Image (cartoon, grey):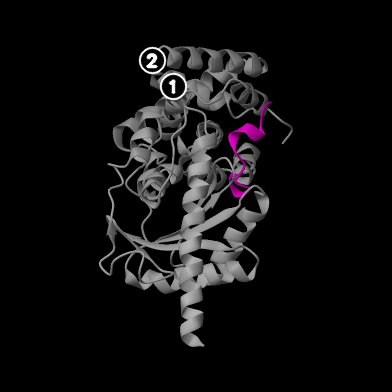
Amino acid sequence: MRASLWITRRVVHRLAIKLIERALRRCAERMPSSTFRLTSREDLLGYVPYGLGFYPQESLVLVGLGQKRLELCARADASWPTRQHVSQFAQALRRIRKITAVLLLGYGGAEIADPTRAVGSALEQRGYPVMELLRVTGDRFFCLTCGECTPPEGRPFEVKASAAAAAAIFAGMVARPDRASVERLVRPIGGLAAVAMSQAVDRAGKRLDEAPCHLQQWGREAVEQALSKARHGDRLDDDEVAWLTLVLQDTEVRDHAWRLTDREVWQLELWLDLTRRAEPSLAAPLAALLSWCAWRQGDGALAMVAAARAQRLDPAQRLAQFVADLLDRASPPSTVTKWPVPL
């Protein structure tokens, strides 16, 4: 009886692998030529760091495949308890009804195998069939469902050498070394640059005090001038940054900037530069605009850390909360076609 059950499980797992490969091929066949194709485990593993925005370490990653594309790529710290993993992943799966195949990847040493299996089992008990369980460490992956489809030492693969990684890089996607490197991107500047910015804010404050009634008009002009300079590859000087940080404290001015911000690379570079250079007490609207622009570009990792910084600086920053909610719901950029929307 046990032997029969073992054989049945092995057959089912082999069938699951074939179904996953078929689903990946089906996604590839229906993708437009401007997108890249995932047709194997190696391709999938090559894509994950670009889908997340960084190379996962000590993480559990949930991948959801739909009929036409990869619908979901979500990550959680491996140190979380199983209940929290299952709650977060199930919440993301509920919000995307197009998913037909679920894969769970554990990034880390041998000790991550059991938590990966536990989360996979719990998801299945909730009605989400997990068709693949893999452990990934360095340049090798191991199947956690059976002991036969990958050798005991794991199957080698190269993320950067994969066709998926090359296509992702060509498409402008970025895979940073780790999550900490993403968080460092939005940290404020220090040293003499911070002192110079503080002095520039004092000058801008005196200018604004002279005619506060013109705030919104001046603010819209400042936003348009900043975007114009950035579009032409020019960097704002300290006085321009300081002035912009002050006028963006006004919600109508911020919404004007929001209305003009989409997914252009030069826009992302502008809001990232300003988020870092702004005096911390004034940086919340800038970080919120950065989070919006990053989300529109599909850079969920940067959008998340930027929104988190904006909310830490100003818990009432509703644009940052709006983006955070979009990220929590795993909403793609196509879900918002007009902005600003009432917050």
| Residue 262 showing in the rendered view | yes
x, y percentage for residue 206?
A: 52, 21
User: Mark 1: which secondary structure?
Assistant: helix
The relative height of residue 262 versus residue 77 in the rendered view (above or below) is above
Quarter of the image with the C terminus in it: top right
What is the C-alpha distance between the residues marked 2 and 1? Answer: 8 Å
Say whether marks 2 and 1 touch (CB < 8 Å). yes
Q: Tell me which residue sits at (62%, 60%) in the image.
A: 90
Find disc 2 in the rendering and name its residue: 233
Q: Is residue 330 magenta?
A: yes
Tell me where the magenta segment starts and ends, as one range: 327-338
Give the residue type at disc 1: Trp
- Classed neighbour count for the residue bearing mark 1: other residues with Cα under 10 Å, few (<14), some (14–19), many (≥20): some
Q: How many marks?
A: 2
Q: Is 248 drawn above or below residue 216 in the view shown?
A: below
Between discs 2 and 1, the one toward the N terminus: 2
Q: Is residue 80 visible?
A: no
Asked where in the image residue 285 lies, by quadrant, the reply is top right
Image location (x, y in percent) of residue 106: 41, 62
Residue closer to the observer: 4 or 300: 4
Per the image, the residue denoted by label 1 is: 266
Furthest-bottom residue in this view: 1
Identify the residue at image location x=47%, y=79%. 6
